[in-house]
Image: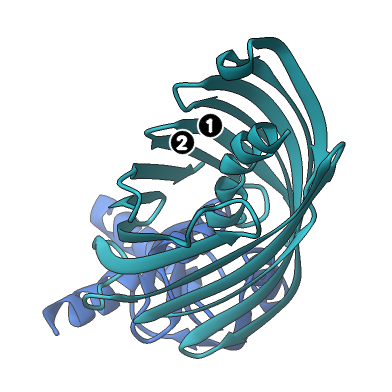
Amino acid sequence: MKKILILITFLSVSAFAATQKIEINGMVCAFCAQGIEKSLSKIKTTKDIYVNLDEGFVILESTSEGVSEDKLKKIIMDSGYDVTQISLINETADVIRKRYEKQ
Amino acid sequence: MFKLLFTFLLILPSLLFAAPMSSKGSVNSMLSINKIYSFIETNYAYEAASAIGVKLFHLDNNNRIRDGIEINHIHRLFRQNKKHSQMNWWLLGGIGYLQGSNEAINDKDLSTAFVSPGLQWDYETKKVYALASHQLVRGDSLNHDITSLKAGFSFYETSYKQTQPWFILEMTNINGITPQIVITPTIRLINKTLYLEGGVSNMGNPKIHVMYTF
């Protein structure tokens, strides 16, 4: 019974978790991009963040539903950059991180 | 008066060489150590495109000592973000006051106020960097133009968490003041919130610049 409850809890959390890919223009150096990471990390639901300078995107993994596009765009613009696209993806930030680190 | 102008203008390159500001809500602090000039500065980005800061400096070129304070404001007039580049126009401005002594003319009570409006353009990709800046210095018996150019390249591209090394060549001219164009080849290292620069000018003056964003 205990195992079933743990499984249900795990599945319900997974069902509400979201990973968003934010494609950003102008993010050309780590000194600049750290502002984005810092701002996103302040969101209460943030679980993990992965910044990819080469491809110009940030992966935001949340513990609940994804952050609204308007809020994300405001955060990125306040950091000095432009958002070109926001999309939901079916992978965790860590999986994506490891994939790019292998390259 | 010429000596006063000369020593005063020695402090100005910091206005041009510091990275202007970081993201909204960030505090940008920097320390620069030079043979004749050192300063500590911090600014706060109260808006996405505006920051206000304060700087304390100490100048000692063997003949005279200067201690000063400047309140400055930085405003980003325009930014163009592209997939692999960033271009900015910045409006710079400061007001300040300095005092000190000048042993060469036995003046131990030297002081002046100043304003320093300027314009800066910069362009950056992951591989190249360029900057052009022009700044006016206006105050009591002060009337000068300062032009600065920087250009450089990154030795190689890095990922977000790696340290990226750059080579930057700095050229500065203070019209009617500098005996020659000051050229300083520098090595720049960037690692997220930490920014380090070091170099030696063609006049033989070493320079170390450290910046950290909170």
Q: How packed is label 2: few (under 14 Cα within 10 Å), some, or many (20 or more)?
A: some
Lateral position of residue B80 relative to residue B209, left or right: right
Residue placed most toward the observer, A2 or A67: A67
Lateral position of residue A64 relative to residue B101, left or right: left
Question: Image height check: is B2 above or below B121?
Answer: above
Residue placed most toward the observer, B42 or A15: B42
Q: Mark 2 lies on which chain?
A: B
Identify which amino acid the numbered label 1 is placed on.
Ile
Q: Quadrant of the N terminus of chain B?
A: top right
Mark 2 or mark 1: whose residue is earlier in sequence: 2
* Tag 2 residue: B31
* Tag 1 residue: B40
Question: Image height check: is B127 above or below B59?
Answer: below
- In which quarter of the view is residue B89 placed? bottom right
| Cα–Cα span, label 2 and label 1 | 5 Å
Q: Residue furthest left?
A: A102
Residue A66: in sight, yes or no? no
Q: Residue furthest right?
A: B140
Lateral position of residue B10 relative to residue B109, left or right: left
Q: Are marks 2 and 1 in contact (CB under 8 Å)?
A: yes
Q: Position of residue A59 (x, y in %)?
A: 42, 74
Instruction: Give the residue at x 47% y 27%.
Output: B61
Q: Which chain is cyan?
A: B
Instruction: Give the residue at x 53% y 88%.
Output: A87
Q: Which chain is blue?
A: A
Question: Image height check: is B128 above or below B98?
Answer: below
Q: Is mark 1 on a helix, strand or loop?
A: strand
Instruction: Give the residue at x 41% y 70%.
Output: A29
Residue B11: in sight, yes or no? yes
Identify which amino acid the numbered label 2 is placed on.
Leu
Q: Which chain carries label 1?
A: B
Q: How packed is label 1: few (under 14 Cα within 10 Å), some, or many (20 or more)?
A: some
